Amino acid sequence: MNRFHPGMRIVAAVLCFLLTDVGASNLMAQTAAPPPRLQITILDGEGALNNIKQRVAREPIVQVEDENHKPVAGAVVIFLLPDSGPGGTFLDGTNMFTTTTDAEGKAVASGLKPNNVAGKFQIRVRVKHGDDTAEATIGQTNLIGAVSGGGAVAHAFPAKWVIVGIAAAGGVAAGIIASKGGSHSTTITPGTPTVGAP
């Protein structure tokens, strides 16, 4: 005959479940992957606008640090450009450039040249030092036209936005001419916006 009260059996089952759950949680916490020991900081090249006609691009520069924010010298750094679409090549004509970090943990992808395809692309950065690895991406854009300090002007915008801009400018000019055509002047006073039920 079972000596345990039915209520006691329920309590015991709940305790077993809780203990098992806590043990599993502790085991999972112990086996969880540690945070990455290498950190990649993009120093230059992010958001760069590359001139396709002049074959000019901003060289990506990264810095590799350890978990204590100390520079990591001698880490192998691979810069990888897309296989197709907007992108470019390095000095040797390939889409991959391999180098090592200097004493300050810095690495430069020298000789980047944009290809003839306009658009946005990403440069993948892979770092390896001993058993530690890290990855990052650097976004750039290839443009047809002049690139200045403020960005690109010619051919930088889709044609539909250029047409909309021209139409809007034409409408403003027509309104100015029409208002100056008569002998009286017109004053435009902004209204007070109201919000009501539809």
Image (spheres, rainbow, N blue to C red):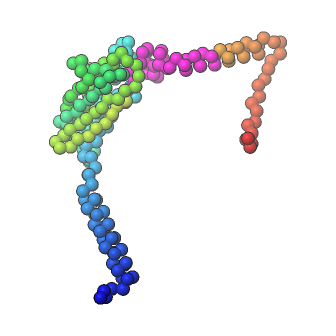
Count of numbered circles in the view: 0
Q: Is residue 141 left or right of residue 92?
A: right
Compared to residue 43, the image places residue 165 above or below, namely: above
Residue 136 among those drawn in magenta: no
> Residue drawn at (43%, 14%), measured in percent from left and top?
145
**Location of residue 129 in the rendering, given as x and y in whole percent from the top left corner:** 19, 40
Q: Which residues are magenta?
A: 140-169
Q: Is residue 158 left or right of residue 115?
A: right
The answer to whether residue 44 shows anywhere in this view is no
Residue closer to the observer: 18 or 188: 18
Residue 161 among those drawn in magenta: yes
Q: Specify the quadrant that holds the C terminus.
A: top right
Q: Specify the quadrant that holds the N terminus.
A: bottom left
Q: Quadrant of residue 17?
A: bottom left
Q: Is residue 5 left or right of residue 167?
A: left
Compared to residue 58, the image places residue 18 above or below, namely: below
> Residue drawn at (50%, 20%), measured in percent from left and top?
158
Q: Quadrant of residue 62?
A: top left
Residue closer to the observer: 101 or 7: 7
**Location of residue 127 in the rendering, given as x and y in whole percent from the top left corner:** 23, 37
> Residue drawn at (33%, 19%), measured in percent from left and top?
114
**Location of residue 97 in the rendering, given as x and y in whole percent from the top left corner:** 23, 26
Residue closer to the observer: 9 or 14: 9
> Residue drawn at (26%, 62%), measured in percent from left and top?
27
**Location of residue 77 in the rendering, given as x and y in whole percent from the top left corner:** 22, 33
